[in-house]
Amino acid sequence: MFESGMIIQNRYEIIERVGSGGMSVVYKAKCHVLNRYVAMKVLKPEFADDTSFVNKFRIEAQSAAGLSHPNIVNVFDVGEENGFYYIVMELVEGITLKEYIQQNGRLPYQTALDFIIQIASGIEVAHEHHTIHRDIKPQNIIVSKNGTLKVTDFGIAKAATSNTVASSAMGSVHYISPEQARGGYSDERSDIYSLGITLYEMLTGRVPFEGENNVTVALMHIQSEIIPPREYYPDIPVSLEKIVLKATQKKPERRYLTTNAMLSDLRKVAMDPNAEVGVLGTVMTDSSPTIQISDEELAAIKNAAPVQTGISMFPVQNNHAEIDEANAALESLYDEEDYDEYEEEFLEDEEDEKPRADVDLKTEKILTISAIAVTVLIALILIIGIFSVAGVFKKKPTTEETPTTEAKVLKMIDVVGLTEEEAIKALKEAEIGYEIERAYDTSFKEGIVMSQDILEGTELKEGDKVKIIISKGAEMIEVPNVVGKSLEEATALLKAAGFEVEADEEYDEEVEKNLIISQEPNGESEAAKGSTVKVVVSKGEEVKVAVVPDLKKKTVTEAEQALSDVNLKLGNVSQEYSETVKEGQVISQSIASGTEVKEETAIDITISKGKKPTEAKTVTYTATFSGNITNSSYSFEEGERVKVTLTLRVGDASYSLIDDYFDEGGFPISIASYVSSKEGLPSKEASLLYSVRDEAGNDITGNFSSTGQATLKKVEQ
């Protein structure tokens, strides 16, 4: 398999192995393209040559890749490396819901309610995209560190338009629906059944059915009634129990027909634990008959091996020989062809369906008796109401029965700032009715009362209820990736997504000026809505500057040293007579002192020749030039030019002859044709000095050679 440090597709670096499932191994990896950590699920080698398993593995990626929701683990990529098939998905830091329940025991109903709403919200999106999970269980739900639940492992999901599912692909047996256990048709309502079992486990800390092996448990899903959660824990709200019982009905048509309908009831309970929800549907003709098992068949099933199926991001052992044996035992309980014909007949015309011998008579009898009891109760209520209006049941007051007490006056208390549990307790003690709403807020921690719609001290009438708003904490949303964008574009994107922006600047040699170098939080991570995203903007390459020193009245040597001390260079040196500056000292400089310039800038100076002589005759020299400057070894880049400087040094005086840029075709440079002559030279001792620098200012003279020379001729005036 993969090892730590391996690079997959020149993009994903394997960090470590984090888990193993029945058909796959999961690794933590780093994506170096988007600079983020991901989870890589890799198909085990023993399945890579099996076309069926490879197709199932690909189906998982295709099913999940089209789903985008905060409560679903995102799939980013799918591929193959040296015969290993892999899926790249979002890395969620946290534990499974199963581990969470094992660590915390049964959950408070408020927590279970919040969790199941998140899970159902993710599954609802999957159903809207015609994808059925078929393996919903706490092991496939991750509780992240920030409290968000994410559904993962659409390992046996397939398009909802499919008509059948092989029995070998059924979900985990403790959460499997009756129709999946029979190997028959399954749809969104099969997921709803598994959601109900998951909620049952959160509320009670246990699954409803346990048996000697998985086949026995599967049969219990088909035949046995679930013990209502309140028989274990009476503190569970009746409304929540009703939702569990409706979601886990044996017959699919008696469950919630859609996840949206189940979510609607769950949200009603979140608002009011006493809400009327979970009303069971009308009794219909049997479209999913209960299988009657003989003692002989039951004995055969009990001897079958345990069943475990599905792919998981967390360690789960799987034995395909045992699966085949267990599935064979289940399939022996019914004739699949007969069952499909029965189901098709029911779907075409359920009104023509005749009662079957295996109808659940006990359930029918209970419902009949219940209907009669409800009818009698409604009749009694109507009779009492009529007589009450007519005054039949009014007791006439006597002189001895004068009222002596007044109705109790209730005043509103202040619960803002309390936790939800504290507020509810205080309101109950004050005998004040209440309604609960929840909203995101960055000012209050999750679970704290943010506001109440009746002020403290207000007198309450009978039946008045206070509405309290409970904080859901900061809403977490995805941060756009703005690295490489301009500050204006990044600001617009971040503010449109709901964030504030704080910008800082840094020099950067690689990132163009005014573009974003980095951001915190990183792009595609999650952060609180309304929080601030810090971005760093490039100032481009740092340009170092120096302050030009005052060179006046310095000698050439002193001036050159002063310039070198501040990373500047001595440029051309010229001479002229001066009545005020001593001979050999600087009269002027090309750039005034105190000016800021780029480091390595050349500063020209003029040196005093002293006072102008009064003699009638002066002796000067004229120089004539010959030779050339040749490129010996320098390799030019396309379009590159170099700067060539040719200076005539006569005594202490220097004269610039060439100070220009040349490309590769400009060499060799003919000194004789470029410079004709130089007149009025003060000395017969002269030398030619040349230098070559690239466009960055680097000295590359060593790559060039010169044969240039100056011939001097004396001139008297």
Image: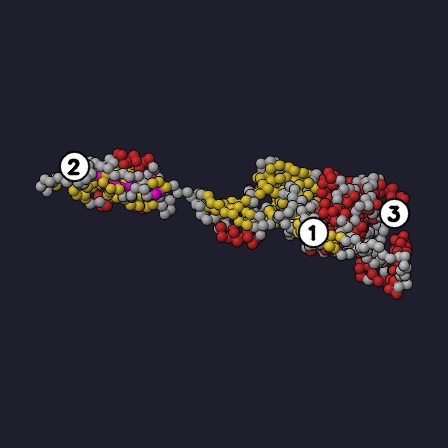
**The residue positioned farthest toward the bottom in the image shown:** 390
Contact (Cβ within 8 Å) of mark 3 with mark 2: no
Which residue lies at the image location 80% right of the left edge and 61% below the top edge? 348
Q: Which mark is residue 611?
A: none
Q: Nearer the viewer, mark 1 or mark 2?
A: 1
Q: Is residue 543 visible?
A: yes
Q: Nearer the viewer, mark 3 or mark 1?
A: 1
Q: Gap between marks 3 and 1, in whole Å?
A: 64 Å
Q: What residue is pinned by disc 2?
A: 684
Contact (Cβ within 8 Å) of mark 3 with mark 1: no
The amino acid type found where label 3 is placed reads: Ile
Judging depth in this view, the residue of 205 and 398 nearest the camera is 398
Q: Secondary structure at mark 3?
A: loop
Q: Which mark is residue 293?
A: 3
**The residue positioned farthest toward the left in the image shown:** 616
Q: Is residue 265 above or below residue 220?
A: below
Q: Secondary structure at mark 2?
A: loop
Q: Which mark is residue 456?
A: 1
Which image quadrant: the C terminus? Answer: top left
Q: Residues within 10 Å of mark 2 (few under 14, many from 20)?
A: some
Closer to the N terminus: mark 3 or mark 1? 3
Please state if 569 lies on the left or on the right of 198 as rendered: left
Judging depth in this view, the residue of 376 and 17 nearest the camera is 376
Please state if 314 lies on the left or on the right of 431 as rendered: left
List x then y, in percent, for residue 655: 22, 41
Q: Residues within 10 Å of mark 3 (few under 14, many from 20)?
A: some
Q: Which residues are magenta?
A: 596-607
Q: Is residue 383 visible?
A: no
Q: Gap between marks 3 and 2, in whole Å?
A: 126 Å
Q: Residues within 10 Å of mark 1 (few under 14, many from 20)?
A: few
The amino acid type found where label 2 is placed reads: Lys
The amino acid type found where label 1 is placed reads: Glu
